[in-house]
Image: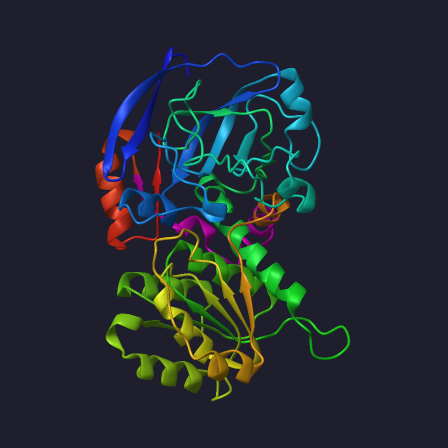
Amino acid sequence: MTSTSVRAAVMDAPGSMSLWTFPDPVVPDDAALLDVTLCGICGTDKHIYKDEVKAHPFGVSTKFPIIPGHEIVGEIEKIGPKAAKRMSLTGGELSPGDRVVPVVDLRCEECSGCKMHPGWPSCEKGDTYGWGISSRNTPHLFGGFAEKMFILPNTKLARVPDSVPDDAAVFAEVLSVGYTSVARMLHSMQLAGDGSSYVGDVVVQGSGPLALAHVIAAKIAGAHRIVVVGMPEYRTKFMRQFGVEVSMDASRLTREERTERVLNVLEGKGADVVFECTGDASVVEEGLSYLKPFGYYLVAGIYSDNGKTTTLNVQKYVSGRYATIIGNGGQTELSYAQALRMMESYSHEIPFEKIVTHRFPLEQYGEAMDAAISEQSMKVAFQP
């Protein structure tokens, strides 16, 4: 780009967005500037817009005004010599023109969270692109709903393989969460037999992009049968392209009917693993009821605190089943690279290029948010 100003869709409060113009930033030796190619609208972006977020993980608040957007793929426009040598997630030197996906949770590497949990989004400062750094702060461009994004010195950038198109790479941040969930589950799981692989039956609660990421990650990890319980019908039908055994519209069935159908598909034995990807605390007890004894329930969708809680029969669904419950609020740094490698390796088996169903220019921010909130879409993305 040759312009001296940069457009961005700014959210100054829940439900309030407008198009702002910022100066094209100067890039120091230890920073970079990214030309944003695509940026997805995440469930977190929708929750912030709908005023459904009391706090993010570790009690961090949204730093309004913000440039939302943390599912980003773009091309390096400028990069300082220091940044070029140390920003690459997997090593090597970066250059202008490289396609990259930024790791959006920043780490200071000095606090106890960073020191005790290397690579995890556990920094006590809570700086995160898209909601954790205000656009008031210079040079302002700290989110993906913009033509350009300023890349701070403590950011890692994951190179996009040449064979992975932008339409797929924009899903890398989401898929990295699915990858991390499966990795956490496998780390906790006592596998049956010496050296056996994971061939469990899986239920995924939810049918949005996060649920799809868990379907894909579980499939690649060797899941036997995958059942999706989600809504609306648009999304449950969409899921069938990705190798699920059964995908049902939860809104058309009672809880008892859903449970009966899940257990029938799994021959009455229940699931080895259930992934919660809805963002709705009220589904937790139902999800636990799908498990077989010694099964694993992983919560990934309830990322932000929206004030909603749930009750459940602990003896019946947890201790009485020897269930293991795992929380996953994000992903490790290296999971971004793993997600991109999964796309590179499985592109002939999994239609990654179909995941982005709707694209909008920045000036149509209202229409884009409406399309994402309607759920008559899978992944909605801005194409600046």
Up-down relation of residue 364 to residue 41 (above or below): above
At a point 58% along the width and 55% down the height, the residue shown is 180
Q: Residue at x 24, y 75 (%)?
A: 252
The quarter of the picture where residue 207 lies is bottom left
Residue 235, position in %: x, y? 32, 61
Q: Quadrant of the N terminus?
A: top left
Q: Dividing the image into 4 quarters, which one contains the C terminus?
A: top left
Residue 300 visible here: yes
The residue lying toward the viewer, choosing from 287 and 117, is: 117
Residue 24 spot, x, y in % from top left: 41, 14
Q: Is residue 379 above or below residue 245?
A: above
Locate residue 226 relative to residue 28 in the image: left or right.
left
Q: Position of residue 259 (x, y in %)?
A: 38, 82
Q: Give the camera-side residue of 281 and 33.
A: 281
Residue extending farthest to the right is 194
Does residue 164 lie above or below 349 as drawn?
Answer: above
Residue closer to the observer: 176 or 105: 105
Q: Nearer the viewer, residue 107 or 219?
A: 107
In the image, the segment drawn in magenta is 340-359
Q: Is residue 350 left or right of residue 312?
A: right
> Where residue 236 appears, x then y in whole percent?
33, 65
Q: Is residue 91 magenta?
A: no
Residue 42 can be seen in this image = no
> Number of callouts in the render?
0
Q: Is residue 312 left or right of residue 326?
A: left
Q: Residue at x 50, y 27 (%)?
A: 75
